[in-house]
Amino acid sequence: MVFSSLLFVFVFLFANLCSQIWIKTTRGKNIAMLVFSLVFYSWSGPRYLVLLAGMTLICWAGALAIERWPRYAKAALTATVALCLTILGIFKYLGFVLTNFQHLFGVPTVIPQILLPIGISFYTFQLLSYVVDVYRGEVEAQPTYWLLLLYASLFHQCIAGPIVRYRDVRDDILTRRVTPGEISAGITRFTVGLAKKAVLANGCAAVADSLLETTADQLAALPAMGVLLGAIAFTLQIYLDFSAYSDMAVGMGLMCGFHYKENFNYPYISDSIAEFWRRWHISLSTFFRDYVYIPLGGNRCSVRRQIFNLFVVWALTGLWHGASWNFVIWGLYYGVLICLERFVLGQDRMARIPNALRHVIVMALVVLGWLIFKFTDFGMLGTALKGLIGLNHNGFTNMTVGLTLKNNIFFLLFCCVAVTPLGKKLRNILGNLAKRNQICYWINAAWDVAHPVVLLIISAMALAGNSYNPFLYFRF
Amino acid sequence: MKNRKKYNGLIRMIKIVAAAGLLTLFFVIGLIWFARPKTSAVEKRTLTEFPKLTWSSFWDGSFFSGVDTWYADTYPLREALISGDQALESHYGLRGDQIVNNNDRAADDIPDASTITPAVADPDAASSAASSSAEAAASSQAEPEPEPEENLPDGTIDELGEKAGSIYITKNAGYGIYYFYQEGADTFASTVNQVYQNVGDLVDLYVMIIPISGGVMLDERVQEDMQASDQAKAIEYLYARMDPGVHTVSIFDNLKKHNAEYIYFHTDHHWTALGAYYAYQMFCQEKGIEPHTLDEFEQVEYDNFLGSFYSSSNQSPALAANPDTVVGYVPNGTNLMTMRERSGNELNWRIVNDVSNYRSGEKYSCFAGGDNPWSYAHNETITDGSAVVVIKDSFGNAFIPWLVDHYEHIYWIDIRYTTNTIRQMVQENGIQDVVIALNIDNGTSKALTDELLRIGS
């Protein structure tokens, strides 16, 4: 199931919220939540539920062993982590590894086609963070298996993140408290996210796909403007898409008494690549920082070692996004840029470049990065990159591209504004005015009451109209 | 000011209740299972059915994703929601001109016809084609019949029918854009040659490939700008690949000459009866007979036609503002016909039918009874026993009425749905002329070559 479907919003979420309101005990609420989460996960195929439950079992047992037998804690940790990563490796990376083996050595001749279980990258990392945190003594192990399963499978974030740490939600799981203020905030957050996905992200996807999601020879016939417009549309799409899912997760959490951390913080206003990665998919970069980068030595070592650490982290970041070389290159691309910023340019020189220019450069690099991210086929990636700088000899623009831009110009401009905090700032201004001015108070109140209803209706319209509903991070 | 706190709480309550209430409303509407539609008139298709629950579909999740699709596809408010979405999307930009892109790949270059030799006929394809398309014809199910109006069944919802390809919309009219694919063209030509080898001694074989509106109505520069293929050149190439014994009917130039007239619909990919008339003139030239003039026929008009371009472009408002009028010219010899539908049902019908009460998307079915496996008209004012069979797609429908006043027996079979063969019709009905009338997309693709081979085997 995906969040942006009529079935999810009108049936599943409705029923789930009813259950959370009517059931009075926390234990009851948790049982209901677990049932709903397992149903949600099974919607993509109950066979993968076995994997989720199994990995949770391994980590549940491993964490208890770490606590129970401190002498063997390290061994238990190593065994658990190795087992989980092996499972992830088999289901996600085996085909990739074997294909590369085949290219190098000619064997094996037959490569098994393993379907990627949905959400495996997210819940594996969540469970690993749990086990490591137990080992580090930062949180107590959870003795009740089904409560840990609830943590791993919680439908708010199981399939599309954010990667939630057990220690951040443990208190919410064990003692739930919901306030009307949070419910109200949750409603706003959820409906904004839903509209962002159903209207904005899907609309950008339509533009991006009409230009870039084509066959190789159609791509080779695109003029430079076509590739650029497609890349920009894709850049907008992937942010609006992914951040919308995080918005919906946070919103649904608030409605039920769960408090998830923010996963995005307007990354497209960044003035440096380092800043971009502090604002994009925050839960992933903090995961790699806390569980890979710092254990490797982090910043507290020689420059050479730091660079090595960075390369490991960025290669893994790329690889996490997909079992394909273009993702690894995408990750390393950012690794190189971060190293350039940190060791070649340095803080002082960066500060001397005017902010506006830095922003433009960063966005250009980000758009280029997304182009690398988009094409898993190197041939097509090469064609796209050549097309971008006009080496395909198709001229600057053509009628189809011009029309595509003209047909969607207001929409795309709106999306460009939507990725900035302008909306939030305007809301804050209105909120402040409301404190002093009676009329503004009532305008603010009217807007507060009306916008979830309006957004819900607009989203329903968009979802009914689109049989088209991709979620890019679904291969993770 | 002091009441703010109380008001804040109240406002928050109203907000929560409003949102919850709306969600509940949507939930309840979704429960009304008997209000769920089965077909969509606007999209011309049957909507998804509730999926079957089997162990394998349960285990691999396809049952659940089927439920997801079914729920959204048949949601009772769906058409209203979609209209709302259209209204919203119409403000996304300046949408006076639009391109709706429906093609899979970039076009091939068209070789110069003067260097071409006829294609080799392919005898091996005949036997496999015969068995596979017999199976296909047998298994094509009848789609649901809509409710009758005025004792006449409504126009069939064309499931297997043609969706418009790529469309260019400008100045409130749509134009079909053509892309040439060499392999398809070569396969089609060799299929025609094989048919000619099989039955060329029994009948006179005519082939008429019909261009779509973009080629005839749009300036060459505009077509080049969107990398469309030159339709005249494509047809020329196709004809050059056919056996010299095949009578090829070149209609492009005559249509182009008259392109200031209403020869193609604005909101539909088909041509009008007037467009078909100009093709009929060229057919007569090839056959060596005199065409009748337009003023010899009674004219009928049915307005408010919004066709395939309108639905394929998601109900573009530019097209909604400029609906078509279907003009029919009633044949003089007879306007009565018999047809055999896909369900096997035989009906009496009219060649140019009154479609004033038909749904606005269905009005092209005014001509020749629409698309059926077999149809027949008997012109009793002619007594020389002349007989023709037209093997056609939907473009052929507007062409049929013009033939009625030249033959005693006029048969027409839809290439996609028929179970007849030429040989059988020669034996049973004494056919002398066979006319293959297809639009250029069908005529330069492999889509229907198996069917053609079976019919001409």
Image (spheres, coloured by chain):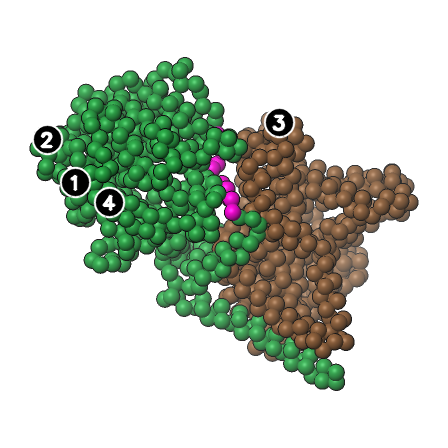
CA gap, disc 1 and disc 4: 11 Å
Q: Residue furthest bottom?
A: B2
Q: Residue at x 36, y 58 (%)?
A: B38
Q: Which mark is residue A393?
A: 3
Where does residue B211 sit, x and y in percent of width and height?
A: 37, 32
Tell me which corner region of the image, top left, top right, bottom left or bottom right, holds residue A105: top right
Q: In the drawing, does residue B49 fall left or right of residue A297? A: left
The chain coloured green is B
Q: In the drawing, does residue B404 fall left or right of residue B6? A: left
**Nearer the viewer's eye, disc 3 or disc 1?**
1
**Badge 4 element:** strand
Q: Which residue is mark 2?
A: B385
Q: Is residue A235 above or below residue B18?
A: above
Q: Which mark is residue B332?
A: 1
Give amino acid for label 1: Asn
Q: Are marks 3 and 1 on the same chain?
A: no
Q: Are marks 4 and 3 on the same chain?
A: no
Q: Residue at x 60, y 68 (%)?
A: A452
Front-lying residue, B121 or B243: B243
Quadrant of the rendering where the C terminus of chain B is positioned: top left
Tell me which corner region of the image, top left, top right, bottom left or bottom right, holds residue B76: bottom left
Q: Which residue is mark 4?
A: B299
Q: Are marks 2 and 4 on the same chain?
A: yes
Q: In the drawing, does residue A244 fall left or right of residue B394? A: right
**Nearer the viewer's eye, disc 2 or disc 4?**
4
> What color was chain A assigned in the picture?
brown
Give amino acid for label 3: His
Query: What residue span does the magenta drawing correspond to?
Result: B96-107
Q: Chain of mark 1?
A: B
**Badge 2 element:** loop
